[in-house]
Image (cartoon, rainbow, N blue to C red):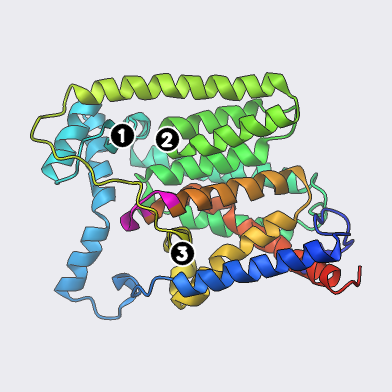
Amino acid sequence: MAGLSAPASEGDRFANWPRAAAMAALVGFAVLLALAAITAPKAAKPVAVRTTITNEALSEIRAKDKDLLLYKAIAERVGAGDNYYEAATEEQRTRNYPVRPGLAVRLPTLALLTGWLGNGGMIALGVALALGVFVAWWRRFGTEPGASGHRAIPMLLLVIGTGLALKPQYLYQHEVWAGLLLALSFGLHRPGKWLGAWLAAALALAIREHALPFVLLAGALAAWRRDWREALAWAALVGLFAAGVALHLAEVSQYVLPSDRPSPPWLVFRGLEGWTSNIVGSSILWRLPPELAAVVALLPLIGWAGWRSSAGLFGTLLHAGYGAFFMLAGRENNFYWALIVIPTWFVGLAFMPRALMTLTKAALGKT
């Protein structure tokens, strides 16, 4: 990581910061990391790491996989010719999943695609998508200040984040596909060159509505740059999404029964624990002690914030924004929502040492 520290001013947002501002930033980061450690959930490690699998442990493993089994069953029925909405509502009802409100039933895109391509086709598509992400980011790192010529470490972190998401057992997980598509969109985007990024984000949004904050951010930054053509394109995508969701909800309503129970609320205000536990639960960080894992989960944000580039600005706002979302929304068992940002989340670690070193020098008056 030392290679990314020179020259200090290139791609370094904190270079030449006033001493008071640098000190305030250091204190702010320290407080955030301390709070992360204090609020870290003291959850036990997943049963999958136990050396002896008892019947009780096996039941727990199966329970953790029931979401994937549900989506697999729906996709298989769609592949056999069943109507998606009939299959989804029946399977969710049979497995004691809520179908109210309508968004408790996932958008049909992934099930339709899986039913059409089959498991083999989806695996091939996933590999191709991951390769596309790597190529897009290799090119982007080559053109961004502070990363050009030092692409090995951020690329390795990108591969780790993408590899965590792209596992055969997660083939039916909507957030995995949406996350890979958003990573592709992020890697493809350049100010003034956004069509490929728009298409990738549109596919992500068609799979999982949780991609909407990405689209809103892209549109807001385009407007901030006064690129009205791009801003209008992102706004049009939001409009298309709203129309698609309206049609989706109308279709779901045709299959809802008066006896169907509603879903528990998603707006549960879990605070900082919601942010860190989602990142930890969706990555290899669960192998670490909870307090340490919670701290490491937030370290990439420092690197993103310190990377002075268009990618650094977008990445900072994107990951901090989703972090705020995880603090406000999502129950404990919705930790996998973080998969939508995991592919790019850890890239910030590549720029963290330089950011902390520059802030420390500025705070000590040595810059």
Question: Is 189 rendered above or below residue 160?
Answer: above
- State how far apart marks 2 and 3 are (Cα): 22 Å
The amino acid pointed to by label 1 is: Leu
Q: Is residue 269 visible?
A: yes
The residue carrying mark 2 is 209
Kindly identify the residue that appears in the image at 68 percent across and 55 percent down: 304
Rendered location of residue 275, percent (x, y):
47, 58
Rendered location of residue 53, percent (x, y):
23, 76
Q: Nearer the viewer, residue 124 or 300?
A: 300
Name the N-terminal-most of marks 1 and 3: 1
Task: Please give the range of residues in magenta.
Answer: 328-334
Name the N-terminal-most of marks 1 and 2: 1
Marks 1/2 in contact by CB < 8 Å: the verdict is: yes
Instruction: Give the quadrant of the C terminus.
Output: bottom right
Q: Nearer the viewer, residue 142 or 244?
A: 244
Question: Is 212 rendered above or below residue 156?
Answer: above
The amino acid pointed to by label 2 is: Glu
The residue carrying mark 3 is 280
